[in-house]
Image (spheres, grey):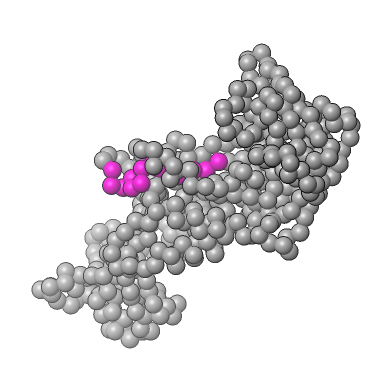
Amino acid sequence: MRDGKYQDGEKVLRAKIDMAHPNLLFRDPLMYRIKHAHHHRTGDKWCVYPMYDFAHGQSDSIEKITHSICTLEFIHHRPVYDWFIEKLGIFPSHQYEFARRNLTYTVMSKRKLLQLVNEKHVSGWDDPRMPTISGMRRRGYTAEAIRQFCDTVGIAKRENISDISLLEFCVREHLNKITNRVMAVLDPVKLVITNYPEGQEEMLPAENNPEDASAGTRQIPFSRELWIEREDFMEEPPKKFFRLGPGLIVRLKGAYIIKCEGFKKDDAGNVSEIYCSYMPESKSGHDMSEMKVKGTIHWVSVPHAKTAEVRLYDRLFKVEDPSNEAGDFKDYINPDSMQVIPNAYIEPALASAKPQERFQFMRKGYFCVDTDSTENKLVFNRTVTLKDAWAKEAKKN
């Protein structure tokens, strides 16, 4: 067999045990098979390879694995695992089984994940939508959050499926403690403060993380023209709309109170500029409690803003358990699982951010610098939203 005298499938090597054994795996199990194929490490040196049941215990023994943790389908393989270790007289690793940790709105089968990769439904094994360690790392999940999720769910002998909302909750809990709060505008519209002196600029202090006093503060540039989120303005605001609209007042985060005086539309009928006045005495930190301003919005100074690509990731599938749905599981892929914003505006302090750094974009969610980032172009991945948007949708349905 080693010399390559036989073709694939022509010969096998079996362990002679008992063809009448009640456990089918003991009925002279296969140990080696012939496979003439190029190996990515050893090239064409070998054409005979061990079967899983034969190699499993030896691999664990070579690496001095004390507890070999497997999923439930390997319960019936354990006696064979133990038999080979005993007969070979090698380091006695022990196999234990527990239920696979399944998650809603994704698949955990390596075969199905491989299909997603090979058929280009995702960019690779480290695609931030994939339930792989590399995918979760690239998306911005922390090891602490994943461990907290695992501790919360626990280990069971019964097949189950864990709600991905719980994992996202654990991620939010940890990121809330460790990330700096920054400002980024994803869907911008220009706001002009008409009574702020033209050409004037000032630096305003901002707290990095209210959960961590040691995180300190940073300086944010403020000017006459700002970018704000388009959704923070309405031409005809309804009751309890505590953002901008004609005659309404809001506080600019860390800056001043402003009042909307008017707006301008472009030829397509979209609001292109919003005009406001500001109250110089309302600078953040001054007592303006008599104003009773109910809304606070974030912003980025137009002349100081940097641009970045922002990728908004969501759940990979539209249904909780795509593997149990009728038809091909790929039919249930969520077409909106990734949305790309090519030019979002970010505050200048973010220009030096490095891959894997994590931030909370105020009022938008938690984001992580992607490995696709370059010196000339930053790319941010949305790790998780600030709240569980899917819970609201499920409640509606």
Considering depth in this image, is 273 or 120 the residue closer to the camera? 273
Residue 142: percent from left, percent from top: 56, 60
- Does the magenta run of residues contain 35? no
Identify which residue is drawn at 33% across, 45% down: 322
Left or right position of 30 against 190 = left
Left or right position of 233 against 34 = right
Identify which residue is drawn at 46% across, 56% down: 167
Identify which residue is drawn at 36% across, 80% down: 93
Residue 372: percent from left, percent from top: 63, 46
Q: Is residue 233 shown above or below 360?
A: above
Residue 342 visible from this viewpoint: no
Left or right position of 327 against 118 = left
Q: Residue lying farthest front?
A: 290
Q: Is residue 146 shown above or below 203?
A: below
- Quarter of the picture containing the C terminus is top left
Residue 314: percent from left, percent from top: 49, 43
Considering depth in this image, is 346 or 204 the residue closer to the camera? 204
Identify which residue is drawn at 69% across, 40% down: 292
Q: Residue lying farthest left?
A: 20
Left or right position of 80 against 65 = left
Q: Residue lying farthest bottom?
A: 89
Considering depth in this image, is 168 or 247 the residue closer to the camera? 247
Residue 24 visible from this viewpoint: yes
Q: Is residue 369 shown above or below 242?
A: below
Residue 339: percent from left, percent from top: 54, 36
- Quarter of the picture containing the N terminus is bottom left
Instruction: Name the dominant secondary structure of the magenta segment.
Output: loop
| Start-end of magenta stretch | 312-325
